[in-house]
Image (cartoon, helix red, strand yellow):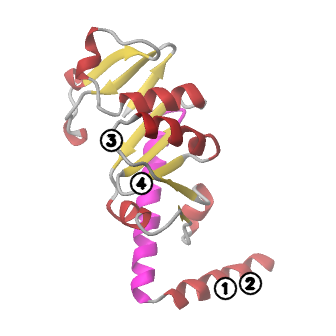
Amino acid sequence: MSVRLGDRIVITRRGAMLGRLRPEDLVETGLEADDAMVTLASTELVVHRAIYRATSALAIVHTHPLHATALSLVEDAIVPVDSEGSYLLHRVPVVAAAKTVGSAEVARILPPALRDHPIAVLRGHGAFAVGEMLEEAYMVSTTLEASARILCILRSLGTDRIREYREGADRYDRW
């Protein structure tokens, strides 16, 4: 996780357990330049910096959601069918990189996807969500995983059921 404060970033340290964060797990460093604390920062710092430079985001949450990550291995986009996911996310792009952890390639390909979407998934790795506050990015992250879980459950029931639901929703929308 990170928050942009002008030309500074507060980001979680390398290896920090998000469920047990303490003040010493937060590292402040420059948006543009490294400083003495940069060696403690998350390995995803290069990606966070690129997202801040390319978007209006003030907060980023990076997660490894189980169901969304699984779907990212077989889809180029995750399109929620549940009401909340459809309303908040519409369509979640999936981007692919050869090296997925803190790479220059991810820093190049992920920000464009986050200009038009509040969240994107890095194929086989996890999701990056943006917002004006951490709570907003966190909400988008949890919505993605709930929607992905629903999609996985529906697929286990058969894809015809998803089509039936979408056709029914289209009929309902016309009323």
Main SS of the magenta part reads helix
Q: Using the numbered discs, state the Cα–Cα distance from disc 4 to disc 3 in whole angstroms.
A: 21 Å
Q: Using the numbered discs, state the Cα–Cα distance from disc 2 to disc 4 in whole angstroms.
A: 29 Å
Residue appearing at x 75%, y 76% in the figure: 173
Mark 4 lies on residue: 142
Chain-order first, disc 3 or disc 2: 3
Q: Could you tell me how many numbered marks the image carries?
A: 4
Q: Using the numbered discs, state the Cα–Cα distance from disc 3 to disc 2 in whole angstroms.
A: 43 Å
Q: Nearer the viewer, mark 1 or mark 3?
A: 3
Chain-order first, disc 1 or disc 4: 4
Q: Is residue 2 left or right of residue 92?
A: left
Q: Is residue 38 above or below residue 168?
A: above
Camera sees residue 9? yes
Q: Residues within 10 Å of mark 3 (few under 14, many from 20)?
A: some
Mark 3 lies on residue: 101
Camera sees residue 58? no
Amino acid marked by disc 3: Val
Amino acid marked by disc 1: Gly
Mark 1 lies on residue: 168
Say what secondary structure mark 4 lies in: helix
Amino acid marked by disc 2: Arg
Amino acid marked by disc 4: Thr
Q: Residue reaching furthest top?
A: 36
Residue appearing at x 47%, y 22% in the figure: 4
Q: Give residue 148's position: percent from left, percent from top.
A: 44, 66
Q: Are marks 1 and 4 in contact (CB under 8 Å)?
A: no
The quadrant of the picture occupied by the N terminus is top left
